[in-house]
Image (spheres, rainbow, N blue to C red):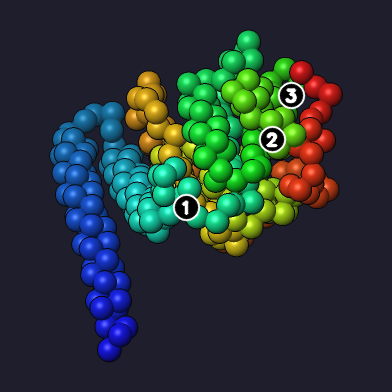
């Protein structure tokens, strides 16, 4: 009998999720049907230069495109639903046992070495978590593929300038993708409990990958402002979630395999002699 309220709560949440997914699917099907109807009407109109087989080919291509896009939306929605409970506020994590590290995912840096607005907001959020004692280690992970482009150097410099000790900031120079960053935080740095910092739209995918890789992870959103290209990011993220669902299933090695680095050591040992 004690488990009955818990079971009811779980069934209620499951039913809510199914209803939300079904509502979104019905809306998608309605939009797709309307678009296909208009496309068919256009295709069946007599056109001297458009023969029958070309019309059929175009029609099949449109149908397949709508089907694939619908599947992508469903996968993206499932990833968001699965991970939404692990996105927390900074205040909610203060009372939790300290984590192995705060993982900050990289993004673009300007040619002068300054972080983009998105990256700056991620670092501001991460510094705040460190000041609150959520963890005593920070890992900045990003792209340092070329000597002339260094995301992690800009990230560490930003944190140090705001009072975070250099020796507790570890740099992952080979975090070329979200999957690489999560795979390497486990294989290189040995972290098992982490807090991920990035923008909200990106957190769902990162948390999904962390779970698939066996990492206990919570996410804190770094949405401190409105971003100019956010609609483009949202659309691209739908496809990126599909890609990382596949990565979560096959779990390939990261692009760069590195020797282990202990988080109990000095973070300055992860610096490289590059700008």
Figure quadrant of residue 167: top right
Q: Position of residue 122 (x, y in %)?
A: 51, 31
Horizontal placement of 257 versus 50: left or right? right
Task: Identify the residue at image location x=40%, y=32%.
Answer: 223
The kind of secondary structure element at disc 2 is strand
- Graded by Cα atoms within 10 Å as few (under 14), some (14 to 19) or many (20 or more), the crowding at tag 1 reads few
Q: Nearer the viewer, residue 83 or 78?
A: 83
Asked if disc 1 and disc 2 are in contact, CB closer than 8 Å, the reply is no
Q: Earlier in the sequence, mark 1 or mark 3?
A: 1
Establish if 247 lies above or below 132.
below
- The number of numbered discs placed on residues in the rendered structure image is 3
Q: Position of residue 259 (x, y in %)?
A: 83, 48
Which mark identifies residue 169?
2
The kind of secondary structure element at disc 3 is loop
Whether residue 176 is visible, yes or no, is no
Which mark identifies residue 192?
none
Task: Identify the residue at image location x=58%, y=52%.
Answer: 98
Establish if 201 lies above or below 122.
below
Residue of label 3: 146
Q: Position of residue 173 (x, y in %)?
A: 72, 34
- Graded by Cα atoms within 10 Å as few (under 14), some (14 to 19) or many (20 or more), the crowding at tag 3 reads few
For marks 1 and 3, give the one nearer the viewer.
1
Q: Whole-Å distance between the Cαs marked 1 and 3?
A: 40 Å
Which mark identifies residue 95?
1
Task: Identify the residue at image location x=48%, y=48%.
Answer: 94
């Amino acid at each position: 009998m004690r488990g009955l309220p818990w079971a009811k709560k779980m069934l209620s949440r499951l039913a809510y999720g199914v209803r939300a997914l079904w509502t979104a699917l019905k809306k998608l099907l309605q939009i797709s049907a309307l678009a296909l109807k208009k496309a068919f009407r256009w295709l069946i109109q007599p056109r001297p230069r458009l023969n029958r087989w070309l019309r059929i080919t175009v029609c099949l291509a449109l149908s397949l495109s709508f089907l694939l896009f619908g599947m992508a939306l469903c996968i993206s929605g499932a990833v968001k639903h699965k991970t939404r409970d692990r996105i927390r506020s900074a205040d909610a994590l203060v009372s939790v046992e300290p984590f192995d590290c705060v993982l900050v995912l990289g993004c673009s840096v300007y040619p002068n070495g300054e972080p983009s607005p998105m990256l700056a907001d991620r670092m501001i959020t991460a510094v705040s978590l460190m000041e609150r004692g959520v963890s005593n280690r920070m890992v900045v992970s990003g792209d340092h593929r070329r000597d002339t482009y260094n995301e992690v150097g800009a990230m560490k410099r930003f944190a140090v300038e705001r009072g975070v000790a250099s020796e507790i900031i570890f740099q992952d120079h080979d975090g070329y993708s979200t999957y690489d960053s999560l795979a390497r935080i486990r294989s290189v740095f040995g972290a098992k409990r982490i807090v991920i910092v990035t923008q909200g739209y990106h957190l769902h995918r990162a948390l999904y990958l962390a779970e698939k890789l066996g990492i206990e992870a919570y996410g804190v959103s770094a949405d401190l402002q409105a971003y100019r290209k956010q609609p483009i990011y949202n659309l691209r993220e739908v496809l990126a979630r599909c890609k990382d669902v596949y990565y979560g299933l096959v779990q390939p090695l990261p692009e760069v395999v590195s020797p282990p680095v202990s988080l109990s050591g000095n973070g300055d040992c992860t610096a490289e002699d590059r700008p």
